[in-house]
Amino acid sequence: MRTRMIHLVNPKTKSFTTRPIYMNRALYSPLAGLLAVAAVIPEDKYEVVLTDENIEPIDFDLKADLVGISAMTSYVKRGYEIADSFRERGIPVIMGGVHPSFMPQEALDHADAVVIGEVELVIDRILDDLEEGRMKGLYRANHLHSMEKMALPRYDLVKKHRYVNSTFIQTSRGCHHACTFCAESLFNGLRFRYRPVDEVMHEIDICGSTHVSLNDADFFGTPERPKEVMRALKGRGIRWQAGVTSRLALKDDMLELAADSGCYMLSIGFESISRDTLASVHKGVNRPETFHALLEKIHSYGILVFGLFMYGFDTDDPSVFEETVKFNIEADYDMCAYSVLTPYPGTLTWYEMLRDDRMVSYDWDLYDQGRIVYKPKNMTPEQLREGQMYAYSEFYSVRSMLRRFPYLSTRNKLFWSIYNLFFRRGEVTGRDLEQPIAAPTPTPEHFPAPPIMPERQDWKDLVLQNNHY
């Protein structure tokens, strides 16, 4: 019996961080989810081919028995185009990822089947149905994965020379912060699920990379668990980065362990320098009055800080752009990303905007954190767009970069330079976006259904009252 072929595809996105703009390399590989899918496909029965359309063309003539497509909202329309093309050739298609999980009925207009949430618990059913020629409809597990004895991602499928950051390792899933603009708690749950530390270390030992990204929603989410991982990392010669929230990043014992175990960068979702703004989106874990001291403390351990900020909250007015960038430069942030608030379908922010009749566009191509698809409250869409461009141009100006460069610090100067050059280039390309302010579109035929309902009753009521199913 011949080995069957499964072709996994990541559609092209317009994000400059996943497109090769320097040295034919992209800043980030977007393949972590598909590598996890490939991991649970039996190698003795199936050949797996992996294509990232950001760095290479798709071979539509490949004689695959099944095509699997993962997509986030901003590139799901391209995913649908790819799915339609393969189905026209008689090849069945299954879709998964965040957007199809939140909007499965929409995805079924283009695919034979859709995975909602985690694939590990339904892959056996999918492959059995594929063999029987009856694979169709929705595949959804009736519980969440324990995170124990997880199959190792298929790193052999990645073209590592095409990415600056190619190895993303999950030590947990879920997040207990429940920020209203984020899909994590509605996709992976409101509680952290941890992988056994020895299994994480085994993956790190065999991944083939000495620089890895710990791909958790909040690696510093609880006080003791990250310490266990970092103690295990010591002595392995690994350089790592992770996304964390600010509260526990102020702790010297946490930072000392991070530095000793090879941490070179922490990405922190600061979001705003306004406490009122943070409270309005349920991110009270951040305390702006501590941000300056936090930067100094993290830097004292030789660790870079990548600050993630967002504009367009209901408490923002046109003064927010200059105030934020001035603070970022004076506080000596190493890198910053400035996003436009995006009400992703199925998030609490989406339902709030829907309730208040503030949604403008349902063109998913424009849901990329750079375009404005809703009505801002205290500024015009033009002011929001111009403010975001001002923030990038000011923070990544030559003057700012010369001021912020870590001349005498032990922070990693190579990575500082790579990130600043990528984002400086990204600011230039961002000015050429087509339709940065979205035009109105009709209401979509299908509306989102969060894989996991909120636990708070008022949020649950908001979802139910504004769901158009």
Image: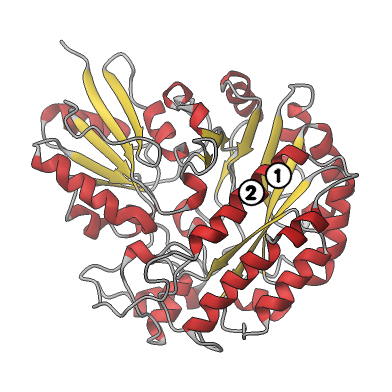
Q: Is 188 positioned to the left or the right of 273 in the image?
A: left
The image shows residue 179 at horizontal and vertical percentages of 57, 66
Q: Amino acid at mark 2?
A: Leu
Q: Position of residue 401 (x, y in %)?
A: 75, 56
- Write the residue at 68% across / 67% down: 394
Q: Is label 1 in contact with label 2 (beta carbons under 8 Å)?
A: yes
The answer to whether residue 137 is seen in the rendering is no
Q: Residue at x 44, y 64 (%)?
A: 432
Does dot 1 land on a helix, a strand or a loop? Answer: helix
Q: Mark 2 packing: few (<14 Cα in 10 Å), some, or many (20+)? A: some
Residue furthest to the top? 1
Image quarter for residue 92? top left
Q: Quadrant of the N terminus?
A: top left
Q: Is residue 177 visible?
A: yes
Rounded to the nearest angstrom, the CA distance separating label 1 from label 2 is: 6 Å
Q: Which residue is mark 1?
A: 417
At which x and y percent is residue 149? Answer: 51, 27
Looking at the rendered structure, the secondary structure element under dot 2 is helix
Tell me the tag on residue 16.
Answer: none
Q: Tag 1: residue type?
A: Ser
Which residue lies under the disc numbered 2? 421
Q: How many marks?
A: 2
Q: Residue at x 35, y 49 (%)?
A: 71
Front-lying residue, 31 or 126: 31
Relative horizontal placement of residue 276, taking residue 189 as reference (left or right): right
Across and down, in percent, residue 324 comes to 71, 73
- The answer to whether residue 48 is above or below residue 106 is above
